Image (cartoon, rainbow, N blue to C red):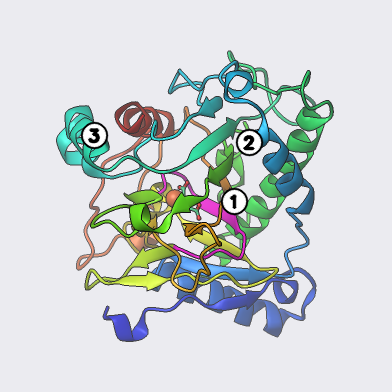
Amino acid sequence: MTTQNFRIPLVDFSAYLKGTEAEKKACVAQIMGGFTTSGFLYLQNSGLSPTEVYKWSEQFFKLPLQEKKKHPNDNSAANRGYSGMGLEKTTNVDIDGGAEAVEKLRAMLPDLKESLEIGSDEGSRYPKKPWKNHYPEEALPGFGEGMTKFYAQCDDLHHQLLCAIAEGLKLPKDYFKEYVTEGDHVLRLLHYPSIPKAVLEKEGAVRAGSHTDYGTVTLLFQDGSGGLQVRTPEGEWWDVEPVEGAIVINAGDMLQIWTNDVIKSTHHRVVSPPNAVTQEDGNYSARYSIAYFAHPDHGRIINAIENCVTKTRPNKYGPVKPGEWMVKRLTATY
Ligand SMILES: O=C(O)CCC(=O)C(=O)O
Ligand SMILES: [Fe+2]
């Protein structure tokens, strides 16, 4: 593949949800076009709105640091709670170099962001887990309820996307369904604080370092700030400009492993926004995003799908346990 056929299609998902058979088929082809080239697409008319969650997110990050620190994300297996500025270093150097390589990178180029990770809550939909979410209910009553609702809505969209992907791979529509029942997904609220222009324009400075995501797909809601970039096969950085009302969807490592590289889990990062207007004080304004990392059930085994393995495309990855993959990568990057 070359940069020439690299694309991030703008997909009207209502064609898949409510269209005729022909419209559905065309929509599936568009989705696969994105996932098999750039690994990214924009999704419109998904029925999902992040407006309420953005409001909660702004309120959460405005809380005093000592309040936020009452809810630390200090356990990679749980992956729930607050991470302060520069704590996580999103990168892939862990895969080859391990935690030590990440540590070196973090010292040089810390990520300029803070985040709150949220997992599934025990209830009618998901089983009990050994960990609980850190909801700042005292400071923000209703926060937990809002997150639980949005988490499930994102999961519904995840299921619909997996059906479309299965169809695109010529598999039964519910092929993936049995692998995604336990709610091992992560909802992450992200805040990239306002920052002096000079800091972000320093050589190598990033709001979030280059990395791939770990799961099936990521649903990414970004505000109008810009700065998200995806890496082309030639190693150039391609702007994923914000499109109002559209969700950015990208494939993660698990889909790449499952499909033996037919679907791409592409490197992406967040840098200084290309069209940003600086504030009067010379700062870039704050950026908010919300990411939903959908994951297969952590205890399952993922192996290459049969029709993605051919003589010319031999099985590249061994069997992988999603939970082990994620903990290994999170342990190194935090
Ligand atoms: O904030 C963004 O736009 C991207 C964040 C991201 O890629 C991640 O958290 O994995
Ligand atoms: Fe990411």
The residue tagged with tag 1: helix, strand or loop?
strand
- Point out the residue furthest to the front here: 281
Label 2 crowd bin: few (<14), some (14–19), many (20+), radius 10 Å: many
In the rendering, at what x and y percent does residue 275 appear? 49, 74
Is residue 256 at all visible to an observer of this figure?
yes
Q: What amino acid is found at the position of numbered circle 1 in the picture?
A: Tyr
**At 58% across and 51% down in the image, what residue appears?**
289
The residue tagged with tag 2: helix, strand or loop?
helix
**At 16% across and 40% down in the image, what residue appears?**
96
Residue 288 marker: 1
| 3 or 2: tag closer to the N-terminus | 2
Residue 61 marker: 2
Instruction: Answer with left or right where residue 198 lies relative to residue 63.
Output: left
The residue tagged with tag 3: helix, strand or loop?
helix
- Quadrant of the image containing the C terminus: top left
> Which residue matches tag 3?
107
In the rendering, at what x and y percent does residue 328 appear? 32, 29
Residue 25 marker: none
Q: Report the front residue among 20 and 31.
A: 31
